[in-house]
Image (spheres, grey):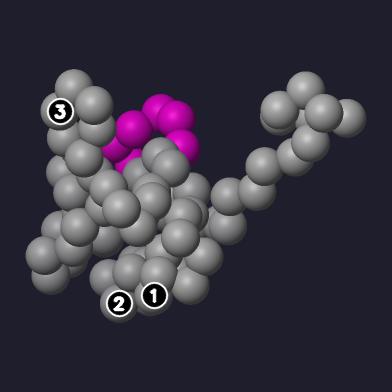
């Protein structure tokens, strides 16, 4: 995936979900905990960081929350 596209999508909505080849579960990227260095992406977590290349991103989508997520349905 093009690094500029991914970065612009995060800047637009504040967060995106991504599928990365080396991880079995989708990753939630937020503008406040994700940095880009060329094609390298660093996701800061509470107990460390994940680093991957944008070439390994196989898909992305805007992350939505529902009322049910918060028990407010």
Judge from the rendering whether residue 39 lies leftward or rightward of residue 61; answer left or right: left
Q: Distance between the residues labelled 2 and 1?
A: 6 Å
Q: Is mark 3 on a helix, strand or loop?
A: strand
Residue under pointer 3: 48
Chain part drawn in magenta: 21-26
Instruction: Classify residue 2 by image quadrant.
Output: bottom left
Residue at the limit of the structure toward the front, as seen here: 72
Q: Do the residues labelled 2 and 1 touch (CB within 8 Å)?
A: yes
Q: Name the residue under label 2.
A: 4
Pointer 3 with pointer 2, Cβ within 8 A: no
Q: Is residue 56 visible?
A: no
Extreme residue toward the right, this view: 73
Query: Residue 5: image x %, image y %?
Result: 38, 75
The image quarter containing residue 11 is bottom left
Q: Is residue 62 left or right of residue 71?
A: left
Task: Tell me the distance, in whole angstroms, between the alpha carbons under discs 1 and 3.
Answer: 24 Å
Q: How crowded is mark 3: few (under 14 residues within 10 Å), some or many (20 or more)?
A: few
Q: Mark 1 points at which residue?
A: 8
Q: Residues within 10 Å of mark 2 (few under 14, many from 20)?
A: few
Percent x, y of residue 68: 79, 29
Q: Does the magenta stretch include residue 22?
A: yes
């Amino acid at each position: 995936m093009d690094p500029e596209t991914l970065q612009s999508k995060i800047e637009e909505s504040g967060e995106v979900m991504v599928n990365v080849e080396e991880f079995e579960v989708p990753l939630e990227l937020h503008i406040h905990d994700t940095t880009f260095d060329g094609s390298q992406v660093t996701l800061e977590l509470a107990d460390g960081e994940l680093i991957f290349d944008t070439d390994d991103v196989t898909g992305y989508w805007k992350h939505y929350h529902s009322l049910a997520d918060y028990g407010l349905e």
